[in-house]
Image (spheres, coloured by chain):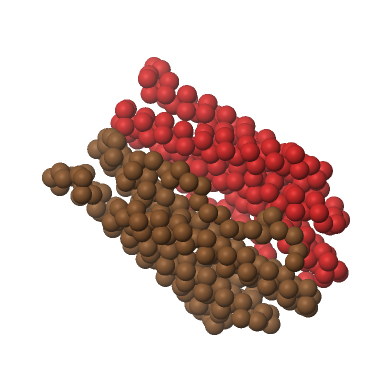
Chain colours: A brown, B red
Amino acid sequence: MEEQVHIASAFDRDLEKIQSQIMKMGGLVEDSIRQAAKSLQTRDQTLAQEVRDADKAIDILEAQINEDAARMIALRAPTAVDLRMILSVMKISGNLERIGDYAKNMAKRTSVLSQMPPISDSTGAIRRMARLAEEMLKDSLDAYIRRDTELAADVIARDEELDQMYNALFREFLTYMLEDPRNITACMHLHFIAKNVERMGDHCTSMAEQVTYLVTGAHPDEPRPKADETSVRTQE
Amino acid sequence: MEEQVHIASAFDRDLEKIQSQIMKMGGLVEDSIRQAAKSLQTRDQTLAQEVRDADKAIDILEAQINEDAARMIALRAPTAVDLRMILSVMKISGNLERIGDYAKNMAKRTSVLSQMPPISDSTGAIRRMARLAEEMLKDSLDAYIRRDTELAADVIARDEELDQMYNALFREFLTYMLEDPRNITACMHLHFIAKNVERMGDHCTSMAEQVTYLVTGAHPDEPRPKADETSVRTQE
């Protein structure tokens, strides 16, 4: 916030408090992604259950952040940049909550997938996707706290990579299902999980776009690269 | 708003304007659901393209509503019930935007599915699911405008029905894929669509919960019925 040299006010203190809540929430969501992917690959049902339990704490934090933001608006009646800042907090906590939900849904499928034969290294591939999503999340939050539009642009660009990993996996799943019908059920679950990781990337992109909005006051004009091609592709 | 007998203020006029925007947005989203499901069943690619184009208008309306809401907060500095009302407008426009996105994604898959052999009456079943989702949407918006918590509870209850329709379809798709591997690709796309319609119901439920929150000041305590069982079910 180089342009804004003003004395720390009650507003700034409130904002700092709410932003530290966002970072705390982000940390919990990062843990969830990492552990959900790990439990899927190692078939660790105890860890999967921990991820499912942790989602409640994330939901509670989101509700808290929204209440604090509402209280701030009511109390301080902020305008222009300050208002934009609080609204972005609410948007970002919503994105984080959704990503947490995806991690929880991933963990839910760990127990059912543990009962099925593994499909090649697909859980390893999903874990690599999850690692990329986790990095995108970390960087979008850093970009947010530092108001770093370059880092935000970098996050948006990386979403394409995640989409391509998803596309490759989608094709693989089709192949495994065609090869052996006994793979079908597991592949349906794995495809569901891969799609959810791909969606995590969309939410990171949305957070990164909030950074641009905060700094420039406008949403990025360019339509962001969208590389999930499975919706327009026939069998190959 | 029986409890609140106060003279129409500038705030009320602003709120009325923004609520009519919400209803307009809701109408567009209802049209999109209906037409996306119709284009899927009738293999009407022109209609599918119309749905995809219409999504831009929905996105623009959401941005407009959020801006108007932010302007209202900044200008009127509302507190308590009034603030809660404006925050709910923002939440609901977010839900509508997501439902519109699901309809668009459904329409995107119409062209690829048109090139594949039909899978029994599955597009008919999806259309029935979409009709239920459309009714839930209409009723959740009516419940919102009339602050009708009974109607809102009814919407929440109907979500279970939609989940059950999805579960039944999921099982059907597994069967068709096992029967004939040539069905696999089409079933993957159809399953994706069915899941998205099921998610529309989740967003209607979230809107209905907003109504309860607006009227009572508290989110519904009861965990809502959740009947997508596919995440914990093995093959049958």
- Residue B230 lies, in percent from the top left, at 68, 65
Give the side of residue A181 with respect to residue B224, left or right. right
Please state, as top left, top right, bottom left or bottom right, where the C terminus of chain B lies in the image. Answer: bottom right
Can residue B161 be spotted in the picture?
Answer: no
Give the side of residue A173 with respect to residue A5, left or right. right
Q: Nearer the viewer, residue B9 or A153?
A: A153
Residue that appears at 52% across and 70% down: A129
Compared with B118, A6 (above or below) is above
Give the side of residue B65 with respect to residue B32, left or right. left
- Residue B113 lies, in percent from the top left, at 77, 53
Residue that appears at 37% across and 20% down: B10
Q: Residue furthest left?
A: A7
Compared with B27, B52 (above or below) is below
Give the side of residue B120 with respect to residue B128, left or right. right
Can residue B31 be spotted in the picture?
Answer: yes
Give the image quarter of residue B15: top left
- Residue B76 lies, in percent from the top left, at 32, 27
- Residue B46 lies, in percent from the top left, at 75, 39
Residue that appears at 62% across and 32% down: B27
Compared with B203, A179 (above or below) is below
Q: Nearer the viewer, residue B229 or B64?
A: B64
